[in-house]
Image (spheres, rainbow, N blue to C red):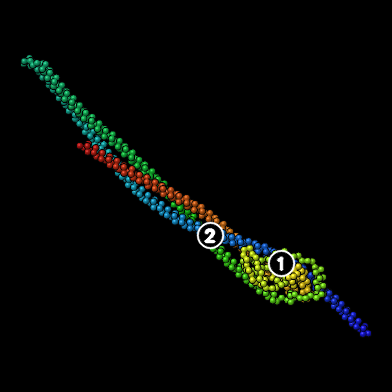
Amino acid sequence: MEEGQKLSKTELQHRATIKKLRQYIAESTKSQTDAKRRIENIEKDLSKAEDRAQRFEQAEKRALSKLNAQAKTEKDLGNVTTERDNLRAEVADLNSRLNKAVARAEAAERRAQMGSSEAESRRVAELKDDLASAKIEREISEEKLRREIRDLKEFLKGKESVAEYKRWSFGENYRCWKVKWKLCGLGQRRYPPVPRATLKQSFCGKSNDYKRIARENWNGIESSLISRLANVENERDEFARREGDLRRKVREANLKSKRIETEVENSHEAFQEMERDLEESRREVKKLSQRLLKAEADLLEAKQTFETERERQDAAWSQRLEEEKSKWHEQLSSSPPYLHPHSESPMTANRKSETLATMPDRPSSRRSPVLPLFPPGLNTPPRQSSYSSLNSSLCLRHLPHDNSSASLEISSVQVLEPEEYFTGAISPVTPSAPETHQSKGINDIVSASTVAAGPSVQLVERMSATVRRLENERAAFKDELVCITNQRDEARQEVVALMKEVEEKRTCDKRIQDLEAAVRDLDERYQTTLEMLGEKSELVEEQKADIQDLKKIYRELVESTMK
């Protein structure tokens, strides 16, 4: 009976144990199914997180490239600013030189205008006075010559009247002598005869003497009149020749003065055109200087905006980093006991082996071992691989982070990534067996789920919150990337505008050089004009000397005619 009772008790115990085992197996099967479903969900979330991480990597690379491009743009802007300053100095130098050249040209023009106008007006007035005096003297000399000719004609008329009188007196004498001859013929009858030959001889002698004297007188008068007429004609011809020479010289002087006036007018027009060009170039230089000042102000504003934005981003990232560090420190300090290494029972090991036999292997992560989520310039700790061990995820240590630009030694607590919740933070893998990392992590999840479902739910909630936070950070990072891209585009546009302004400034410099060459040409023309004016003044002096000589000659001629 006792043995039967013992057997019955043993059987009841075995049945109770079998019942408990069956209940436990059913519960474990249900928990395994739930764990499989949660693991599948976790794997999906993990794959999504890996995709997000890859997108974050790509975004980070793009951000780094944009930052490098922005640094290059800043360097180009610095070069352009230096070139702009040099160009501004050159513009100031050219403006000063241009103002000096304009002042010299204006002074030379004023001197040339004053000197040339006064000298020309004075010379023209003197020439007009000389011409008027020459005309008056010519009229006086012509009047004197006409008076002399009239006197000579009157003298000739007087001589002719004298000759007529002498001829008449000779005829009267002849008649007297004829009467006497007749009387003599009558007297021969009364008185003794006078020899006829003697009378005839005396008569012939008297007549011959009279004719000889009259011929000599007439020849003398005629020769003197002819000589005086010849002298008067010669003087008239000489006066006409000198008057023609004087008129020719005056005409040449007038032509030269007109030519000089036309040249002066042309020089005035050229100078006015040069002044217009200079005013235009000054306006262009003023516009360019204003545009340069505006571009400089925009550049300074863009630099200030960039500096403030960078400082704000640095502060924001530093603040986020500190928040993440504090959160992960709190999470590490408040981690549940099942996340730590523990010994496993044979039953648990069997359940793990069965679970692993029914589960497919999760694909390995495609992420790189080191994924810098933030730019290297923000002093962020390096990301840990999704397949790191529990010891490396829970220990506080320093890791070297290799960067292409600089080697930064970062001493900070390592931040756990979202996928590290599912791999490294749950699987207690020792460094001696890294190849069993994935399977042990799944077994630990299964064992943790069998032990208590609460921490796994809390872990999933924390992970979903972390994923949402990462998505928010990704959106903010995208917005910041858009802002940086817009700033980069604006900087490029400013650089293009500055390059265009530099090209315009070079064209203005070339135009200013051309204007300076034109001003030098105008100065040379002014010098040649002044030299020509000097030559003209010498010619005018020579003409004055010739006029003085003509005056002396006319004066001597008048004095000789008056005598």
Image coordinates for residue 70, horizontal then vertical, percent: 60, 61
Which quadrant of the figure has residue 473? Answer: bottom right
Residue positioned 18% across, 25% down in the render: 215
Outermost left residue: 191
Q: Give, as a three-letter code, the residue at label 2.
A: Thr
Identify the element where label 1 is drawn: helix
Q: Residues within 10 Å of mark 2 (few under 14, many from 20)?
A: some
Residue 53 location (% of width, % of height): 69, 65
Cα distance in 3D space between marks 1 and 2: 46 Å
Mark nearer the N terminus (1 vs 2)? 1
Whether 348 is drawn above or below 540: the answer is: below
Q: Position of residue 411 (x, y in %)?
A: 64, 71
Circle 2 is placed at which residue position?
81
Q: Is residue 324 above or below residue 205?
A: below
Q: Are marks 1 and 2 in contact (CB under 8 Å)?
A: no
Q: Is there any visible trace of residue 284 in the rendered image? A: yes
| Residue type beneath disc 1 | Ala
Q: Position of residue 46 (x, y in %)?
A: 73, 67
Residue at 20% in and 26% down:
219
- Are there few (<14), some (14-19), or many (20+) residues within 10 Å of tag 1? some
Taking the image as shown, residue 194 lies to the left or right of residue 381, namely left
205, 160: nearer the viewer: 205
Q: Which residue is mark 1?
A: 49
Residue at the farthest bottom position: 2
